[in-house]
Amino acid sequence: MQSAPPSPEFSRLVSALRFPLILLVVSAHLMPTQLRRPQVEEHYIYSYLVELVSHVLARVAVPLFFFISGYFSFWGKDWRRREVFLPAWRKRLRSVLQPFLLWNALAFVLLSAYSAVTTALGGSPAAHHDPSWTQLPHYFTDQVLDYPLWFMRDLICLTLLSPLIYYLLGLSRGWILLPLALLFVLDREMSVAMLGSRALFFFPLGGWMAIEQLDPIKALRPLRRPLLGLALVLGLATPFCSYGAAYPYYRYVLNGYILTGCLSVLAWGQQLLTLPPQLLERSAALSSYVMYIYAAHALLLLDLGRWLAYRWAPLRPSGALPLLGYLLAWGLTVGLCFLTFALFKRLAPRLLRLLYGARL
């Protein structure tokens, strides 16, 4: 198999996309996970927009990360060979498993301390946090304590399964992707080694395009207009399907949007790369913070960002300027991530390198 590098355009697109995608991940966690029906009231525009951003648009971020990981994991590699998969497994051990374990351990310590302090002051302990030893193993497997890191857990499992994925893609000549796509869109959730249908479709999809040495930008470009049209229709309609008679179709519409939305981003990659060079370079430079923001934002920083933003009553969801409060909470959370990163780098650089899996 050729070991030439992927196309420079696709590599540039990935570098420029990683930071905007992590901003979407943060936005997804700004709002409660339960659906909120857009109400016909004075805050209708606010409720619709935050649902659209946090519960619809943001849903393309993690599948795109899976696609990108699959693409670069399979490019130029024959996963049937021991000399390929054994070094890849060892590399993942340090670059993914190490930070996954350390961040979850840090989450356990921080949330235990938070619960102890708030309980002593007469408040409530941290939600979804049980400090018992019997619960501890679940925080590193099926109930990840630092909850955004379920992506890293899935990535570890996908890496271990990569020889099998490579074999199945080759045996089926890629046709296995069709039933996987159907299972994803129809929301037939699977659980293979703790992996859901998103991971089991988008990672192999990226892997297959790498095996075939396809440039996603060029391969999908002829479909860019119908893909974008479908993504816009499905995405804008999704909040209205979250209640009432349309609710049974909500997951189908949402998953259809996720699929067409992800493919649209790739299909329009060439146009995205025509944005001002300074903007693309700045976004690529900020990608060095992606790993930290992904892991750190859910460790009390999100709660602190919301608390600071909503100190002024008009900025609260029930206030006169709720959309401004939402944007401020989003910005403050990301700002707190930058601030704590700088503190880590200055006061505990060795710990930061360990948390980064030697990426720094």
Image (tube, grey):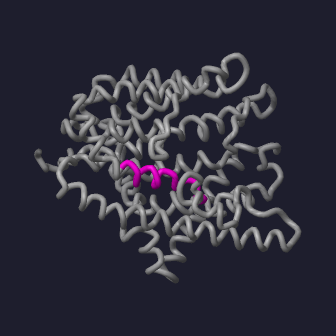
Relative image position of residue 136 (x, y in whole percent): 61, 64
Relative image position of residue 20 (x, y in whole percent): 46, 49
Q: Residue at x 25, y 44 (%)?
A: 9
**Residue 360 appears in the picture as rendered:** no
Please, is residue 94 above or below residue 8 in the view? below
Q: Is 156 covered by the magenta stretch?
A: yes
Q: Residue at x 86, y 72 (%)?
A: 121
Q: Residue furthest top?
A: 245
Please, is residue 334 above or below residue 47 in the view? below
Relative image position of residue 50 (x, y in whole percent): 66, 39
The answer to which of 155 and 3 lies nearer the viewer is: 155
* Left or right: 107 as drawn, with respect to 314: left
Q: Is 223 covered by the magenta stretch?
A: no
**Residue 213 appears in the picture as rendered:** yes
Q: Residue furthest right?
A: 122
The quadrant in which residue 225 appears is top left
Relative image position of residue 47 (x, y in whole percent): 71, 35
Name the main secondary structure of what is drawn in magenta: helix
Q: Residue at x 69, y 66 (%)?
A: 132
What stretch of residues is rendered in magenta?
Answer: 145-158
* Left or right: 268 as drawn, with respect to 78: right
Task: Name the quarter where the C terminus is drawn.
Answer: bottom left
Please, is residue 97 above or below residue 245 in the view? below
